[in-house]
Image: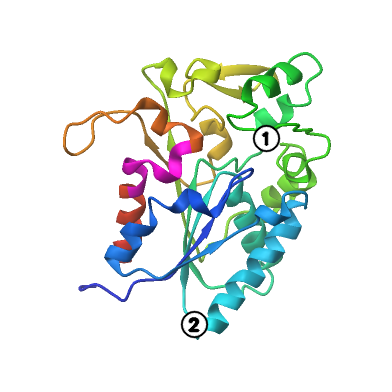
């Protein structure tokens, strides 16, 4: 196959406690490459369940198609828990009918297997301390994990995570998982936890690892048969060293190296 096909439209899905503005560094690259896009917002649904928001995503995509009269394949880029929202729509809600045409799903730092941090939030010994340290950094003021439906839905043992594991990934979609890591152990990568990320070990115990982005560990992002694209802090194409904190979970959508990776996938010719 040769030549460049017409750009495939992109649907953007932000993560938990976030907003569509996280894509502001990526949008100019879309404009330069003439890639159509639509930003899905679930800011106003902060207290809803993950399946409810997945249903709203379905409606958003259908509205986009109706407004543009485009009914071909789309690419979906999701950050963090936004990937779980997207996957629930595609793999659970749309699996039987298989109506939604998606070329590829690109997940940035996704907690595909549930979140150790979400579980830690309710830990009787460490929960309050971790929430306090993350307040204003990753969690909002007054955060109560017992009242946050999305946080409960991303617990490893939740019904939503069980449904995703049972459904499995779709064979008609190309999955990309982009994550970062901190192999050098640079504390500035994510100062809150000294550059490390919480995960749950095989023994069921919490532990800190350098194989994560400060919020989501690599083991939480893995999908069966899908390799992780791991981008550690380091020099860019010009030899400059971006700030280490640009590689942490919160900053993935505006990290230049991550954006370059995304653009390579969007503009590559599918074989």
Whether residue 62 is in magenta: the answer is: no
Whether residue 252 is in magenta: the answer is: yes
- Residue ranking furthest to the bottom: 69
Q: Provide the residue span drawn in magenta.
A: 251-259
- Residue 16 figure quarter: top right
Disc 2 or disc 1, which is closer to the eye?
A: 1
User: Residue tagged by mark 2?
Assistant: 68
Q: Which mark is residue 140?
A: 1
Residue 15 shows in this picture: yes
The image position of residue 123, as x and y in percent, is 78, 21
The image position of residue 97, as x and y in percent, is 67, 75
Q: How many marks?
A: 2
Q: At 75% from the left edge and 44% from the top edge, which residue is drawn?
A: 153
Mark 2 surroundings within 10 Å by alpha-carbon count, few (fewer than 14), some (14 through 19), many (20 or more): few
The image position of residue 53, as x and y in percent, is 70, 58
Quadrant where the C terminus is found in the figure = bottom left
Q: Earlier in the sequence, mark 2 or mark 1?
A: 2
The image position of residue 66, as x and y in percent, is 57, 83
Q: CA distance from mark 2 to mark 1?
A: 36 Å
**Which residue occupies the foreground of this view, 146 or 120?**
146
- Residue 268 figure quarter: bottom left
């Amino acid at each position: 196959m040769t030549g460049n096909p017409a750009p495939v439209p992109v649907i953007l899905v932000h993560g938990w406690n976030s907003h569509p503005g996280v894509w502001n560094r990526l949008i100019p690259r879309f404009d330069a490459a003439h890639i159509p896009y639509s930003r899905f917002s679930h800011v106003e649904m902060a207290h809803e369940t993950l399946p409810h928001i997945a249903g709203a995503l379905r409606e958003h995509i259908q509205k986009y198609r109706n407004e543009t009269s485009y009914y071909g394949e789309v690419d979906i880029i999701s950050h963090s828990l936004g990937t779980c929202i997207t996957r629930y729509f595609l793999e659970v809600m749309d699996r039987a009918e298989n109506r939604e045409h998606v070329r590829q799903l690109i997940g940035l730092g996704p907690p595909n297997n549930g979140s150790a941090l979400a579980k830690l939030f309710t830990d009787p010994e460490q929960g309050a301390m971790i929430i306090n340290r993350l307040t204003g950094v990753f969690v909002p003021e007054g955060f109560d994990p017992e009242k946050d439906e999305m946080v409960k839905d991303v617990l490893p043992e939740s019904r939503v995570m069980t449904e995703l594991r049972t459904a499995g990934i779709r064979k008609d979609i190309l999955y990309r998982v982009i994550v970062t890591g901190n192999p050098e152990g640079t504390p500035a990568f994510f100062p809150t936890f000294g550059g490390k990320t919480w995960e749950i070990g095989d023994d069921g115990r919490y532990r800190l690892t350098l194989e994560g982005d400060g919020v989501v560990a690599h083991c939480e992002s893995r999908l069966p048969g899908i390799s992780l694209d791991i981008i550690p802090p380091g020099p860019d194409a010009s030899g400059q060293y971006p700030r280490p904190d640009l590689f942490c979970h919160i900053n993935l959508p505006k990290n230049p190296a991550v954006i370059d990776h995304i653009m390579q996938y969007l503009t590559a010719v599918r074989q």
